[in-house]
């Protein structure tokens, strides 16, 4: 794990709110695993002066070409300045950091349910599962069809893709629940993976408990160091003693056991 | 060859650069060789187990941050069993930071943590987030002295006193802990601050108040370090807004014998290595043979008395 200066190869809009960033990062790409993240030093531009780095999950890891890809939503100071990077510019990346997904080869059919920035985090899970010969179905939830970003990529790595959107009225909890139940009951779904929505987290926790199916969730929390040192990014998690305790998202996660996680807000 | 070694209150350090307590953890060893820094300083340990402050725990500014972490602590037994072993393979002296709610408890935890592998005990009498309205022993010279006296009676290790900047006369506190037997003083912890999330009409931090740290604090804490260095004979360790070698040199020149790097470790995990290399390069450029010759090397400006407004 190290801090490295990478060259930006590509940083373009994929729709009105998300950009796709590709950097040349042989060192990071060789080591990164699905669910891990890099801590990016966003440039300081005028009034936008992000002090700390900003965490971004790896969206794609191209070990062969030594490239890292990120898919990010522009929400505030850091992502605004990140969006100004042009091919040829340098970006300081620190990582890979955190604990990624643990995809045991004994799984048969992973059901992944993602929304928003969660699409970026879960994309490499499908790719890894494909290499391990594990079937993956990805339920991608988004505001509208143009915000369903990684469908083609997921299909190209062998995942079956189900897109559900608010604008088409297919993304409500009841509809997603029917999909997931059917994947478990008829298609042998035996592991849940999720990111990006508290509503979907609660749904999978309920279904996981009901069917006795395990799973993992990638959590997010604003971060200071990203390396387990500052304890700024803690959230509450269920502990062994039947209570809850704070754990560091950057160090103990960002990927946690599905049932240990607690949806932090609505 | 520049002699980078320093002696701080009874321990020899290979160079004058170490982390501030609570700004490094095991993760740092994955990023750099801990044998290169002057000392390892671990996060403050308290006698009881605590969870720390409720999130949100941080607010950032252009040149610093406001954090309210509290002291998440698993207690001294856990520290000895789980934290110390991580650092056993390094030959760098380990400074164990402790805090406690009473003088007695300060004594007890100091005795307990004077374990093999611990070279120094640093007294965190300054942490502003101890869930007691931001008040701390360090705000009162008498209370600070009582803590240090009890700690000195409870251990054969050197005791460093880490001061709080949330006082009007920091030199008085420094003198009190020196008289009580402290082997060095660290100046200083975070400055109490707060922020409001105006959109939601609520405090930005779960704990309401937090510690302001980072570069924006440097002029203020540097001034305090200068005042403390003039008031005591024991070594002073500067801690406040050090991000570069130049920043560290300021502290050395106003009278510090060593420095602690804090918040900057969060942005550049290898910041301490750059500070060490930069100090060494400066010494070579200026023909300074020993880094300890930089301590107090600031010369008065011609024609002005010290402290006189220009
Ligand atoms: C492990 C991890 C992986 C992530 N991966 C991705 C990703 O692949 N793609 C992506 O678009 N985003 C991802 N995020 C979220 C991303 O880090 C934040 O959106 C980003 O830090 C916001 O920075 P900003 O300066 O633009 O916004 P700020 O100006 O700092 O804040 C804008 C808003 O975003 C919230 N926010 C700030 N930081 C975070 C954070 N770290 N997590 C959640 N909310 C935050 C703030 O509370 C505020 O409401 C990830 C977060 C984590 C912790
Ligand atoms: C997140 C965080 C946690 C800290 N925890 C402790 C602590 O446990 N004990 C302590 O004595 N000081 C603690 N400090 C204070 C630092 O050690 C240091 O004195 C302070 O941050 C000033 O230095 P800086 O401006 O370089 O950060 C903490 C500071 C930060 C930012």
Image: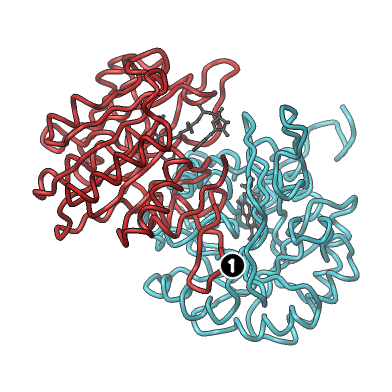
Q: State the image coordinates of residue B210 (x, y, percent, origin top left).
A: 73, 48
In depth, the one of A123 and B36 nearer the eye is: A123
Would residue B277 be visible to someone looking at this image? Answer: no
Q: Is residue A49 left or right of residue B281?
A: right
- Looking at the rendered image, the quarter that the C terminus of chain A falls into is top right
In depth, the one of A167 and A195 nearer the eye is: A167
Residue placed under numbered mark 1 in the picture: B7
Number of marks in the image?
1
Q: How is the image coloured?
A: by chain
Q: Residue at x 33, y 27 (%)?
A: A164
Quarter of the image where one finds residue A59: top left
Q: Colour of chain A?
A: red
Q: Residue at x 37, y 59 (%)?
A: A210
Q: State the image coordinates of residue B49 (x, y, percent, origin top left).
A: 63, 73
Ligand 2 within 8 Å, label 1 CB: no
In depth, the one of B293 and B137 nearer the eye is: B137
Q: State the image coordinates of residue B187 (x, y, percent, origin top left).
A: 72, 55
Would residue B261 be visible to someone looking at this image? Answer: yes
Q: Colour of chain B?
A: cyan
Q: Is residue B55 left or right of residue B26?
A: right
Above or below for B79 versus B277: below
Q: Residue at x 62, y 35 (%)?
A: B60
As helix, strand or loop, the secondary structure at mark 1 comes to strand
Give the letter of the chain under mark 1: B
Q: Is residue A126 left or right of residue B118?
A: left
Label 1 packing within 10 angstroms: few (<14), some (14-19), many (20+): some
Above or below for A96 versus B97: above
Above or below for A255 versus A126: below
Q: State the image coordinates of residue A125 (x, y, percent, origin top left).
A: 23, 43
Above or below for A26 versus A75: below
């Amino acid at each position: 794990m190290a801090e490295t200066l990478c060259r930006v190869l590509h940083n373009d809009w994929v729709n009105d709110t998300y950009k796709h960033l590709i950097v040349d990062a042989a060192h990071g790409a060789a080591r990164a695993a699905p669910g891990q993240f890099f801590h990016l030093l966003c440039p300081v531009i005028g009034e936008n002066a992000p002090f700390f780095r900003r965490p971004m999950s790896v969206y794609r890891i191209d070990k062969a070409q030594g490239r890292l890809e990120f898919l990010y939503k522009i929400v505030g100071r850091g992502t605004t300045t990140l969006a100004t990077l042009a091919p040829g510019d340098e970006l300081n990346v620190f990582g890979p950091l955190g604990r990624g997904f643990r995809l045991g080869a004994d799984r048969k059919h992973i059901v992944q349910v993602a929304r928003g920035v969660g699409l970026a985090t879960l994309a490499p899970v499908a790719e890894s599962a494909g290499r391990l010969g594990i079937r993956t179905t990805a339920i991608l939830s988004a505001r509208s069809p143009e915000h369903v970003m990684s469908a083609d990529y997921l299909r190209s790595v062998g995942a079956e893709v189900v897109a559900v959107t608010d604008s088409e009225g297919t993304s409500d909890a009841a509809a997603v629940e029917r999909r997931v139940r059917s994947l478990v009951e008829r298609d042998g779904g035996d592991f849940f993976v999720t990111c990006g929505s508290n509503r979907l987290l609660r749904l999978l926790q309920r279904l996981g408990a009901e069917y006795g199916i395990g799973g993992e969730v990638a959590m997010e929390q604003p971060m200071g160091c990203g390396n387990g040192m500052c304890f700024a990014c803690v959230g509450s998690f269920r502990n062994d003693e039947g209570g809850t305790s704070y754990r560091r998202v950057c160090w103990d996660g960002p990927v946690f056991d599905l049932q240990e996680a607690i949806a932090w807000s609505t | 060859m520049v002699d980078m070694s320093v002696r701080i209150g009874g321990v020899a350090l290979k160079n004058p650069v170490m982390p501030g307590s609570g700004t490094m953890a095991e993760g740092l060893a994955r990023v750099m060789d801990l044998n290169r820094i002057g000392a390892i300083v671990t996060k403050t340990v308290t006698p009881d187990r605590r969870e720390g402050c409720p999130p949100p725990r941080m607010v950032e500014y252009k040149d610093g941050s406001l954090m309210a972490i509290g002291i998440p602590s698993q207690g001294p037994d856990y520290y000895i069993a789980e934290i110390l072993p991580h650092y056993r393979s390094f030959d760098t002296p380990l400074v164990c930071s402790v805090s406690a709610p009473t003088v007695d408890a300060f004594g007890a935890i100091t005795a307990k943590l004077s374990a093999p592998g611990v070279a120094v005990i640093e007294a965190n009498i300054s942490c502003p987030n101890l869930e007691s309205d931001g008040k701390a022993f360090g705000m009162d010279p008498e209370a600070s002295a009582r803590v240090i006296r009890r700690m000195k009676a409870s251990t054969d290790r050197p005791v460093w006193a880490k001061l709080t900047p949330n006082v009007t006369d920091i030199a008085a506190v420094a003198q009190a802990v020196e008289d009580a037997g402290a082997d060095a003083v660290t100046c200083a912890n975070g400055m109490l601050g707060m922020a409001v999330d105006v959109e939601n009409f609520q405090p930005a931090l779960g704990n309401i108040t937090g510690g302001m740290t980072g570069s924006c604090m440097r002029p203020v804490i540097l001034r305090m370090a200068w005042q403390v260095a003039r008031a005591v004979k024991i070594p002073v360790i500067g801690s406040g807004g050090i991000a570069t070698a130049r920043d560290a040199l300021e502290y050395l020149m106003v009278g510090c014998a060593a420095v602690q790097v804090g918040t900057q470790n969060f942005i550049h995990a290898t910041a301490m290595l750059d500070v060490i290399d930069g100090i060494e390069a400066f010494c070579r450029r200026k023909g300074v043979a020993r880094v300890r010759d930089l301590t107090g090397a600031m010369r008065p400006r011609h024609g002005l008395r010290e402290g006189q407004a220009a």
